[in-house]
Amino acid sequence: GEDVEQSLFLSVREGDSSVINCTYTDSSSTYLYWYKQEPGAGLQLLTYIFSNMDMKQDQRLTVLLNKKDKHLSLRIADTQTGDSAIYFCAESIVGGGTSYGKLTFGQGTILTVHP
Amino acid sequence: GAVVSQHPSRVICKSGTSVKIECRSLDFQATTMFWYRQFPKKSLMLMATSNEGSKATYEQGVEKDKFLINHASLTLSTLTVTSAHPEDSSFYICSAIYTAEYSYEQYFGPGTRLTVT
């Protein structure tokens, strides 16, 4: 089955870049997502990438995918205190069958941004 | 992005009673929705897949008679926690799949905090 792993904590200074890493095990065609969760709230979709892509950039966010190593990263440029949250990477298998749309989440990385 | 709502956001109920949580896709139709449970400082655990017009598919270990799911329309799925017990206290989050040409996105509701006393 699928397995997704993340480091649990990351602490950065305001204005620096943050890089959150994630590894996954399934080699099937997948979508890989990054979600942000603030305390007591649901998950906010930040960005996603299909497994045939290497990189995707969206304003301050850059997603890098190394398919050979099954490694995904999220870079947040110019990190702000408002970026403090838990960040989850998740993998979804594309295609039919009983796994359609199911997300397998990593444990979440707690990002702390300090002045 | 697409919006998914949940109601209520918080509910407190007594042990032995039932609680219904609604999940709505506000600006798109979703044939598939998911229900997750999240424990404090933990990741999300998928409970079941809710399919419009058919029975829900439950993950291993999730009691289907305790967590009743109904996908009444293309914009509404409900989760009913029957005969709730304190160990059912948790944060329940739903999600819905939004598909369009060249995109495949899954949006989450804001969650429902259930406390069983």
Image (spheres, coloured by chain):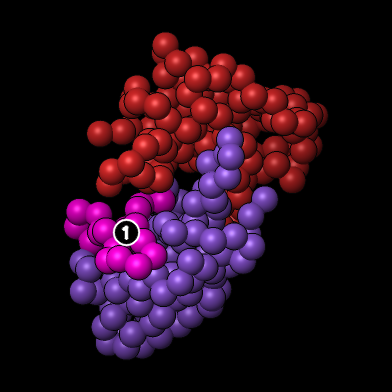
Q: Is residue A53 shown to the viewer in this render?
A: yes
- As displayed, is residue A71 above or below residue A36? above
- As displayed, is residue B77 above or below residue A64? below
Q: Toward the viewer: A44 or B69?
A: B69
Please give the letter of the chain rendered in red.
A
In the image, residue B7 lies at what x, y percent?
Answer: 54, 75
Amino acid type of the residue tagged 1 in the rendering: Ala
User: Picture quarter containing residue B68?
Assistant: bottom left
- Badge 1 marks a residue whose secondary structure is strand
Q: Is residue A25 left or right of residue B65?
A: right
Q: Toward the viewer: A25 or A98?
A: A98
- As displayed, is residue B1 above or below residue A72? below
Q: How many marks?
A: 1
The residue at the point 63 percent across, 41 percent down is: A46
In the image, residue B100 lies at what x, y percent?
Answer: 58, 45
Q: Is residue B56 magenta?
A: yes
**Which quadrant is home to the C terminus of chain A?**
top right
Q: Is residue B47 magenta?
A: yes
Please give the letter of the chain rendered in purple.
B
The residue at the point 36 percent across, 61 percent down is: B51
In the image, residue B92 lies at what x, y percent?
Answer: 43, 64
**Badge 1 is on which residue?**
B48
Host chain of mark 1:
B
**Which quadrant is home to the N terminus of chain A?**
top left
User: Picture quarter containing residue A20?
Assistant: top right
The residue at the point 40 percent across, 27 percent down is: A29
In the rendered structure, which segment of residues is drawn in magenta? B44-62
Q: Is residue A13 shown to the viewer in this render?
A: no
